[in-house]
Amino acid sequence: MDRLELEKSKAYISVEIIEYVPNSVVNKTILRKSTGNISVMSFDSGEGLTEKITPFDTFAQIIEGKAELVIDGDSILLETGQSIIIPAHKPNLIRANGRFKMIMTVIKSGYE
C-alpha cells in the first residue's frame, strides 16, 4: 500500500478520515494518480488557503461545517453537503470562518 493514500478495498466514513489540528490546515491524500487526485482536508477556524490559480478544474465538497470560497472575486458560502466546481485558470481562495472539512478532487486533463 502506498502510505500517501488510504488503503484500497476498505470502507471509510469521509468525515472521520481526518481530524482537526488547532491553528492548522491538514491535508490527507485519498487517491493520487497522474490524471488527478482526491484529498480530504480539515481547516481550523480562521485558517485558509491563499489565492491561487490552477490549470485544472477542482471539485470541492464540504463534508462538515461551513466554508467560504472566493472564485474570481465572487464569494460563495458552502455548507455541509454542498459542493462546487472551481474552474481552471480562475483565481480562488478558501477561508474558514469556523472549522470545516472538505474533499477536493482534481482532474488533470483537457487543459495541458
Image: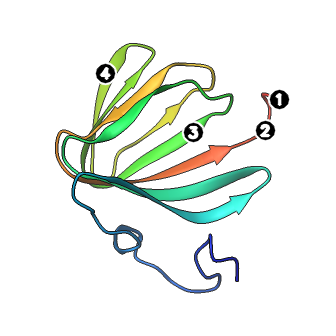
Q: Is residue 70 left or right of residue 112?
A: left
Determine the residue located farthest toward the front in the rendered image: 23
Judged from the image, the secondary structure of the residue bearing numbered disc 4 is strand
Callout 3: SS: strand
Q: Please tell me which residue is depicted at 68% across the width and 28% down the height of the picture.
A: 55
Tell me the CA gap for discs 4 and 3.
16 Å
Say whether residue 31 is left or right of residue 33.
left
Camera-nearest residue between 64 and 99: 99
Check the picture and name the quadrant holding the N terminus: bottom right
Q: Residue 58: x, y in percent?
A: 57, 39
Residue 22: quarter of image: bottom left
Q: Is residue 77 above or below residue 108?
A: above
* Alpha-carbon span between mark 2 and mark 3: 11 Å
Q: Residue at coordinates 69% horizontally, 44% vertically from top-left?
A: 107
Q: Which mark is residue 75?
A: 4
Residue that badge 1 annotates: 112
Residue behind mark 2: 109
